[in-house]
Image: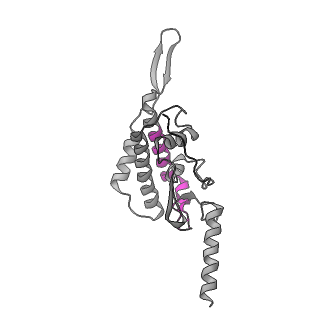
């Protein structure tokens, strides 16, 4: 029996997620007020759905728990690297190793193939058994590109606790969504009222 995809609360993508799937990956575990969390990769079906939405897996990929676990593990390693970059701290060597391992799981150069009728051509070999490896490599490459690009200066954590999402700052904006911005402004207003009493 196929596991149903459970719909999650709709949150708009944080600034930068659409350009950087690694940012969307890191933001797939969401801390909500009241100590609640939402994990968009919580089950194999949710993982398959998340990958499909980003063009990283076909709808019928049939993810297993091992696949979901690998993606969740890479998410935590990339989150660690993003946190180190934002907080100007040294990266954990294990996180760098995990990212590099994901990068090298699949060939990145198109290999030479030869068709008896049409002759030579180049293509990247990605059999269906390597769907997860290709997704991991793609996400790791995007994270490495983001961390080494000028956009890394704009990478920041959402400034509205308990939110744990990351975004690419645009102007002075320091929140991942209107919801977080409203919550932060309300908290500041409450603090001002409480201090004036």
The x and y percentages for residue 70 are 40, 43
The residue stretch that appears in magenta: 135-164
Asked whether, in this view, residue 183 is left or right of residue 28, the answer is: right
Q: Is residue 35 magenta?
A: no
* Residue at image point 43% right, 48% down: 72
The x and y percentages for residue 118 are 53, 11
> Between residues 35 and 184, which one lies in front from this camera angle?
35
Asked whether, in this view, residue 104 is left or right of residue 1, the answer is: left
Q: Which of the 4 quarters of the picture holds residue 79?
A: bottom left
Q: Which of the 4 quarters of the picture holds residue 178?
A: bottom right
* Residue at image point 46% right, 15% down: 114
> In terms of secondary structure, what is the magenta stretch mainly?
helix
Q: Which of the 4 quarters of the picture holds residue 160?
A: bottom right
Q: Is residue 103 visible?
A: no
* Residue at image point 52% right, 31% down: 60
Asked whether, in this view, residue 168 is left or right of residue 74, the answer is: right
List the single residue furthest toward the front.
1
* Residue at image point 61% right, 77% down: 188
Q: Is residue 9 visible?
A: yes
Quarter of the picture containing the C terminus is bottom right
The x and y percentages for residue 110 are 47, 28
List the single residue furthest toward the top.
117
The x and y percentages for residue 61 are 49, 32
When the figure is inspected, residue 37 is found, relative to residue 128, above or below; the finding is: below
When the figure is inspected, residue 110 is found, relative to residue 76, above or below; the finding is: above
> Between residues 153 and 143, which one lies in front from this camera angle?
143
Q: Is residue 145 magenta?
A: yes
> Between residues 97 and 122, which one lies in front from this camera angle?
97
- How many marks do you count on the picture? 0
> Between residues 160 and 116, which one lies in front from this camera angle?
160
């Amino acid at each position: 029996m196929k596991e149903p995809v459970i719909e999650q609360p709709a949150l708009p993508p944080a600034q930068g997620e659409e350009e950087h799937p690694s940012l969307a990956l890191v933001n797939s575990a969401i801390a909500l007020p009241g100590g609640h969390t939402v994990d968009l990769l919580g089950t194999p079906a949710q993982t398959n759905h998340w990958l499909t939405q980003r063009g990283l897996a076909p709808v019928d990929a049939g993810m297993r728990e091992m696949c979901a676990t690998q993606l969740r593990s890479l998410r935590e390693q990339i989150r660690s690297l993003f946190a180190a970059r934002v907080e100007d701290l040294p990266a954990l060597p294990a996180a760098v190793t995990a990212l590099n391992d994901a990068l090298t799981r699949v060939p990145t150069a198109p290999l030479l193939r030869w068709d008896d009728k049409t002759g030579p051509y180049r293509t990247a070999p990605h059999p269906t058994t390597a769907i997860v490896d290709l997704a991991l490599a793609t996400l790791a490459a995007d994270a490495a590109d983001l961390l080494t690009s000028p956009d890394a200066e704009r990478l920041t954590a959402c400034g509205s606790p308990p939110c744990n999402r990351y975004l690419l700052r645009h102007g002075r904006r320091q929140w991942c969504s209107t919801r977080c911005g409203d919550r932060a402004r309300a908290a500041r207003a409450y603090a001002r009222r409480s201090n004036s009493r």
